[in-house]
Amino acid sequence: MEISAITFPHKTSVVSRKQFDDHVTLYDGYVSMTNLTDKTLATDPQYKTASTAGGHYRGWKKTETYSINGVILHEMYFQNLGDQATSPGPRMTSIINKYYGGFDKWKEDFIACAMSARGWCILAYEQRTATCRNILLDLHDEGHISMAYPIIVLDMYEHAYFLDYGTDKASYINRFIDNIPWGIIEKRVGVIS
C-alpha cells in the first residue's frame, strides 16, 4: 500500500522557515523510500538469496524499518513542534509526576537524554513495565523499545536544528520544550491512560 506525505505548515517558533522546509524535504524522501521499499519487496524480493551476511533481501528489509520509522517519527515530531509556551495538561502532569516526581526532574532527564542522542529523544510509554521513559535512538530503527508508544518526539539529528542553532544543541532542546503543544500531547497520552 502506497503512503502519502502529510503536509505540515510552518507554525513553530522553534526553527526557522528555511530549517523547517529543508527538514520536510528529508521527510518526503522517507515517504518515497518507504513506497519504493514496499514495491521492491512485493515485486522482486529475491527470497532465495536471503542471508544474514547481506544481500538484496536483507538490504531492503533493513531499509523497510529505517524508512517507515523515519516517516512515523518525523510526523510525530512535526505535530509536536510548537509555537508558544503552554503548560502540560492534567493527564500529562499526572504522568510526569508519577514517573519523574515533577516537571523539572522530567525536563532535566529529557534534556540529558536529548544531549546524548544522535538521532531522536522520545518520551515513551513502555508497556512491559508500564513505565514512561525518556529514550534515545541513534538511528530511526535502533534503540526502540518494542511496543513502546511515543508521547513526545524530538529530532536530534543535526539536520533538524543546525541551520538555526549550529552546535548549540541545548538552546534548540530548551526552545523545543518551552514550546511543546501540550494539547497534542494530552491527546497522545489519552491512548495510554
Image (tube, rainbow, N blue to C red):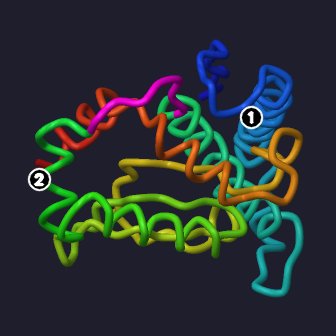
Give yes or no for residue 82 being in the magenta stretch: yes
Relative to 45, 131 lies left or right: left
- What's the mark number on residue 108? none
On screen, 135 above or below 94? below
**Quadrant of the image containing the N terminus:** top right
Q: Position of residue 11 (x, y in %)?
A: 59, 16
Q: How many marks?
A: 2
Picture quadrant where residue 142 is located: bottom right
Counting other residues with Cα less than 10 Å from the Cα at mark 2, is it few (<14), some (14-19), or many (20 or more)? some
Q: Amino acid at mark 2?
A: Ser
Dot 2 or dot 1, earlier in sequence: 1
Residue at image point 64% right, 69% down: 115
How far apart marks 2 and 1 lie (CA) works out to 33 Å
User: Could you tell me which residue is drawn at 73 percent across and 64 percent down?
Assistant: 62
Q: Which residue is mark 2?
A: 94
Q: 173 or 56, which is in the foreground?
A: 173
Q: Which residue is the site of mark 1?
A: 27
